[in-house]
Amino acid sequence: MAAGARADLSIDDLVRRAREGSPRAVARLISLVEDASPQLREVMAALAPHTGRAWVIGLTGSPGVGKSTTTSMIVSALRARDLRVGILAVDPSSPFSGGALLGDRIRMQDHVLDREVYIRSMASRGHLGGLAWSTPQALRVLDACGCDVVLVETVGVGQSEVEVARTADTTVVLLAPGMGDGVQAAKAGILEIGDVFVVNKADREGADATVRDIRGMISLGERRQAGDWRPPVVKSVASRSEGVDDVMEALDKHWDWLQSSGELGRRRHRRAADEIEALAVTALRERIGDLRSGRGLDDLAAQVVAGDLDPYTAADRLVAAVAG
Amino acid sequence: MAAGARADLSIDDLVRRAREGSPRAVARLISLVEDASPQLREVMAALAPHTGRAWVIGLTGSPGVGKSTTTSMIVSALRARDLRVGILAVDPSSPFSGGALLGDRIRMQDHVLDREVYIRSMASRGHLGGLAWSTPQALRVLDACGCDVVLVETVGVGQSEVEVARTADTTVVLLAPGMGDGVQAAKAGILEIGDVFVVNKADREGADATVRDIRGMISLGERRQAGDWRPPVVKSVASRSEGVDDVMEALDKHWDWLQSSGELGRRRHRRAADEIEALAVTALRERIGDLRSGRGLDDLAAQVVAGDLDPYTAADRLVAAVAG
């Protein structure tokens, strides 16, 4: 039944329904993104005129610092302002989204029945580019469908923080006392990407020390961040919604600064350039892959082995074939 | 003076002199490769007809197993057969080749004055593609300049063994007793790339146990190697040239097998295809980089931010610009 209904809907219909607030239509559009559907280009073309309005907040931190509870706390505050909110929970380590979804459902139970909140877990499905490729596009769907704010929640492992920071207007780095997070933060380079630092579980011993550590590192470190924004460090106990006002104040101040300083435009420009470049490189690599499985590269390699062709000239011909 | 002489020499003259046996001309050609000189294409085109004759032997192992002494031992044996030998010492970890050169000079003192032996240290100079890019081309220089055998010596760290294996006709994995090398070998996946295993420093305690370990792992492991070659495991004490006959016998048998089985052609074909593909990807990436620093990508990004263009259509235009 669902499949039949889907087949009947044109992309334009689907986009219209999604923009009218149908969660099912939004979910279907994100699935088209995740599955790298052949209709994806049509979807993106239909969405383009409606994008660029959402405030994208990235949230990252090590496992156990309370990312989902903090996300839930922020969502409640945004809903109290009557804003439509999208949540993308990104888990690069998991090939399936089942576990993440279950976790979301438990922690996000306050919001799961709220029609003005879209919750979606993104998991790498192993196609070219992975999450770095699908997340910005899922974001674009939620943006075009009228979300005022999109929260992108990422497990802070390795490369993923940096990718969140590239995707977001505002990047929140979550820490918790007694996890050696300060040192970890410095090591992982997340000091440089955080616009707002939240020390969660601040009822635990060592919270003030963690705040001091981070503040010290911020003032010591030569931040490569553009402009004159000095990242605030605030405390929260997200499970009891303590500190929510401080967190929201820090976020709002950053949003105001982004707009007044012109940094918002610069970040979005950079983000679009990154996305275009990544899509172009993916397309070119795919074409080379096609040639590899076909005869083209084989013939060139045979000529190089025979000494009839040097590898540069062969590469020129491969580039020409890819470019054709 | 040297600079003047170089400027006067055409690439054809340089290639002619190098092929006549001028070590200075060979060194100059390899420098053109390492520096990614604009003349590089001309060099490669001039060399192409003369390539494909050298037997390329890759030699890899952890620091301290005696790679340079083993290389020196093998070189002596090859020189006793009156063969011309090239040596490429590859050190991906060092941004400068100074240290490696000094080490070579001390250990290679038997050969450094021998005009039929070319010794060259390759170090990553940070350009696109790095050693994976410059090593096959330096190899091509030595091959075209009449080396009968080229030895490529690589520090066995991480990815580098695999790259040696891709470059070589025959890959020698060096081990030493009491270094936990067996376990390390299994972990690093070098069991799969070794055509010949040499347990060096075999006068140390535990040498026979190491030989047994490696043999056991070879028979247990499902080797993905093509054909019916079963890698021999031989012992040596390279510092005293003990075991040199066993090592040479193992190498010769592998060379014979490569030719009789047709594997030599397959490996060289694969190697050429890899090289062409890498050069093509580098060329395409450079073009995208040029566009990024120029106005092209900027204009596209501005249109995407404004919602006038979707990222896919923008990427299509970027690909078209790169391909043009």
Image (cartoon, coloured by chain):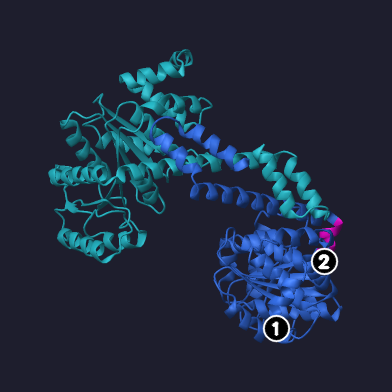
Chain colours: A cyan, B blue
Q: Quadrant of the C terminus of chain B?
A: top right
Q: Is residue B139 above or below residue B114?
A: above
Any part of residue B197 in sight: no
Quarter of the view holding residue B86: bottom right
Q: What amino acid is found at the position of numbered circle 2 in the picture?
A: Lys
Q: Is residue B186 left or right of residue A73?
A: right
What secondary structure is marked by label 1?
loop
Q: Which residues are magenta?
A: B255-260
As rendered, which of B158 and B128 lies closer to the eye?
B128
The residue at the point 69 percent across, 40 percent down is: A321
Above or below A214: residue B115? below
Whether residue A142 appears in this view of the structure is yes
Residue B107: where, in percent of width, then height? 67, 84
Which element carries disc 2, helix, strand or loop?
Answer: helix
How crowded pointer 1 is (Cα within 10 Å; few <14, some 14-19, many 20+) is rated as some
Q: Amino acid at mark 1?
A: Met
Q: Is residue A285 magenta?
A: no
Q: Quarter-wise, where is residue A118 in the image? A: top left
Q: Residue A212 is drawn in which quadrant?
A: bottom left
Instruction: Kindly identify which chain the residue marked by label 1 belongs to.
Output: B
Is the stretch drawn in magenta largely helix, strand or loop? helix
Q: Give coordinates of residue B31: x percent, y percent.
A: 67, 70
Distance Cα–Cα, label 1 vs label 2: 26 Å
Whichever of callouts 1 and 2 sits on the residue coming sooner in the sequence is 1
Say which quadrant the N terminus of chain B sits in.
Answer: bottom right
Q: Which mark is residue B108?
A: 1
**Tag of residue A102:** none
